[in-house]
Image: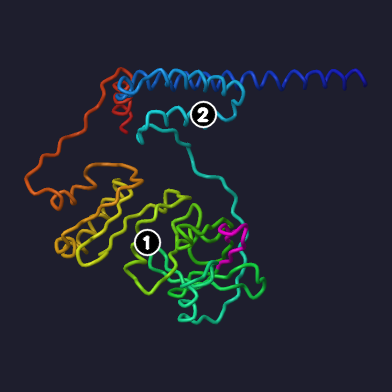
Amino acid sequence: MTMKRNLWSIVLCFAAPYYLSAQQHASIQDFEFLVEKIRNDYPGYEAKVTPALFALEDRIRHKLELHPDSSFYYFSEYTSYFRDGHLRMGWLGGSSAPQSESVTIPVHRIDRDSLLRKNRDSQNLEGLWVSNFGEEIAILRSAADTNSFDGVFLSEDEGFFNFTPLDDTTFVCTAEGGDPVFQKKGFASLRLNRKILEIHHTNHRFTRKSNDDIYDRAVTYTYIPSYPNGRNNYIMASVLDDSTFFMRIPGFYDYDKERIEEMLTWYRDDIRRCPYFIIDLRGNRGGRSSAYEALLPLLYTHPFVLKGVEWYASAGNIEEFETALKEGV
């Protein structure tokens, strides 16, 4: 009996190093495939290759030997070298993050004018806020726990939420009901000199409301999220003043095209009336040229020609296109 236990201990001791060695080998193999693929099929390779790239490759190989379970991070570090948004790593499948339990927040008696007065000099969350979708929310100290804050939408019955401070500007955000982005436990931060309340990794952020709606919209529409995800990138448009029209376009994909065309239809007279037209492309994800075709007549004063896409005809790219044609992709 004792011999069996000792033998089993020896097997376990040898199994772990063998697994690590196999994982190292697989990670380095995958990295060599990535390096070779970019070298042969990426059209910008020749223009961007420098000795620094080869040094980076050697450094990543060494890191993969030490930390093979972090291969995605190191592969992303490699593709980031090329500074090309079309060349990047991505996950297959969605997030498996667990959903947190919701809590019920008590309803407060809300005095809108009083909250607006608090906004003038408030350094905490108390006050009146307006979201990037135009919804107003009131945030007050919680009656149940004076160290936390309760929030409620004023415009629609979209649920309640609570903010518990982690530090001076960061909060745990827990919510119930309404918009699905508030149904799980997450985080929120005060940003931009406490003028913006950003709900991390959602499509919501709030601007501390002032008596100047144009100023509030300008703050909201120009703010670039510090904790973004795919959903908090959306088009925004506004007349900033008598001479300036502002539009923020975060992407040129098919689903952006319809929104761009709608905005241009709604605001066409305002755009033509204003001598200045600001198009904010910071953080733009790229996309298709067809998505911004409706903008071009507003930007050009003479006829223009749109050319098609050029493809790098490497052996690997040709093979992938031929496979796609055969499979009907």
Q: Main secondary structure of the magenta part?
A: strand
**Nearer the camera: disc 1 or disc 2:** 1
Q: Percent position (x, y) of residue 41?
A: 33, 21
Hey, what amino acid is under mark 2?
Answer: Tyr
Residue 158 placement, left or right of 326:
right
Q: Which mark is residue 219?
A: 1
Q: Residue at x 42, y 70 (%)?
A: 209
Residue 291 placement, left or right of 180:
left
Q: Which mark is residue 1?
A: none
Residue farthest to the front? 121
Residue 24 placement, left or right of 312:
right
Q: Percent position (x, y) of residue 151?
A: 54, 70
Q: Percent position (x, y) of residue 300?
A: 12, 48
Q: Residue at x 75, y 18 (%)?
A: 14
Quarter of the image where one finds residue 134: bottom left
Quarter of the image where one finds residue 50: top left
- Alpha-carbon neighbours of circle 1 within 10 Å: few (<14), some, or many (≥20)? some
Hey, what amino acid is under mark 1?
Answer: Val
Picture quarter with the C terminus: top left
Say if mark 1 contacts mark 2, CB within 8 Å: no
Q: Is residue 319 magenta?
A: no
Q: Residue at x 53, y 58 (%)?
A: 188
Counting residues from the start of the chain, the first of labels 1 and 2 encountered is 2
Q: Which residues are magenta?
A: 161-173
Identify the residue under disc 2: 74
